[in-house]
Amino acid sequence: MIQLLPGTPPSVTYLVGRQVSKSSAELERQRETLAVMLASIGDAVLACDTAGRITYVNPVAASLTGWSLEAARSQPVESIFQIINEKTRAPAASIVSRVLQEKRVVALANHTALISKDGRETPIEDSAAPIVDSQGTLCGVVLVFHEVAEKRRAQEALRESEQRFRLKLESIARAAGFDRHLAKPPSIEMLEELLGSLSKASSSTQPI
């Protein structure tokens, strides 16, 4: 709060008070604009202070974690943002602690899943970044994350499709005796080339 010295002319007092009011109104307007933006984006957003306690939860984050802003505020971030490794089922290392220590953007490891308040498990991808003020002082950490269940299913379907394709081509190679001349199993590229050659040979063969 600005303290004016005794004897300050009334006109100066008026102008300073008016400027402070304008600055406060502008700051409040900026805060409201930021809140609307964070509430409108498709990603989940969590923020915490340098003690690792929650200061902000947007609606998407509330849906994924099961914690509203009111319930999560001032709670330790690890209590709200509980993550595990999908493969090992082990708790994941605290990404917030790393950001606070290293003061840089950190991305989650692969195969990370979020455990919600009611026990739901959601595959996610995310990153966390330090929050700094205009003086460069570290004020907290912001986490931005999103669900990737559909992406994981698509990747798994692609892997299964590639595996089926490889098995089919290897079967063709064995039937043609192609694999006996190789020191190691043929690559997909080699098998595709073989399949193309066999197809051309078949189409060019004329009946006797």
Image (cartoon, grey):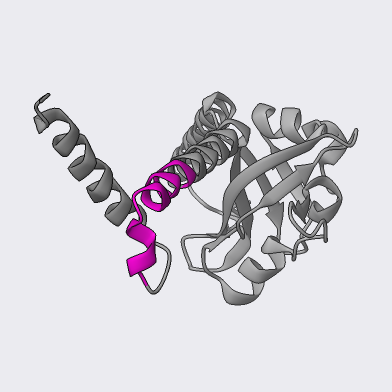
Outermost right residue = 118
Magenta stretch: dominant secondary structure: helix
Nearest the viewer among 14 and 132 is: 132
Nearest the viewer among 62 and 120 is: 120
Where is residue 199, by image quadrant? top left
Where is residue 123, by image quadrant? top right
Nearest the viewer among 3 and 60 is: 60
Rendered view: 153 above or below 186: above
Q: Residue at x 83, y 34 (%)?
A: 120
Q: Which contiguous range is marked in magenta?
A: 167-182
Can residue 59 be seen by looking at this rendering? Answer: yes
Q: Residue at x 60, y 56 (%)?
A: 110
Decide if residue 80 is on the left or right side of residue 161. Answer: right
Decide if residue 124 is on the left or right side of residue 71. Answer: left
Where is residue 45, by image quadrant? top right
Q: Residue at x 19, y 33 (%)?
A: 202
Q: How many marks?
A: 0
Rendered view: 171 above or below 138: above
Can residue 17 be seen by looking at this rendering? Answer: no
The image position of residue 17, as x and y in percent, is 52, 39
Q: Is residue 208 magenta?
A: no
Rendered view: 168 above or below 108: above
The image position of residue 183, as x and y in percent, is 38, 74
Nearest the viewer among 181 and 108 is: 181
Q: Quadrant of the C terminus?
A: top left
Q: Residue at x 68, y 27 (%)?
A: 59
Decide if residue 19 is on the left or right side of residue 79. Answer: left
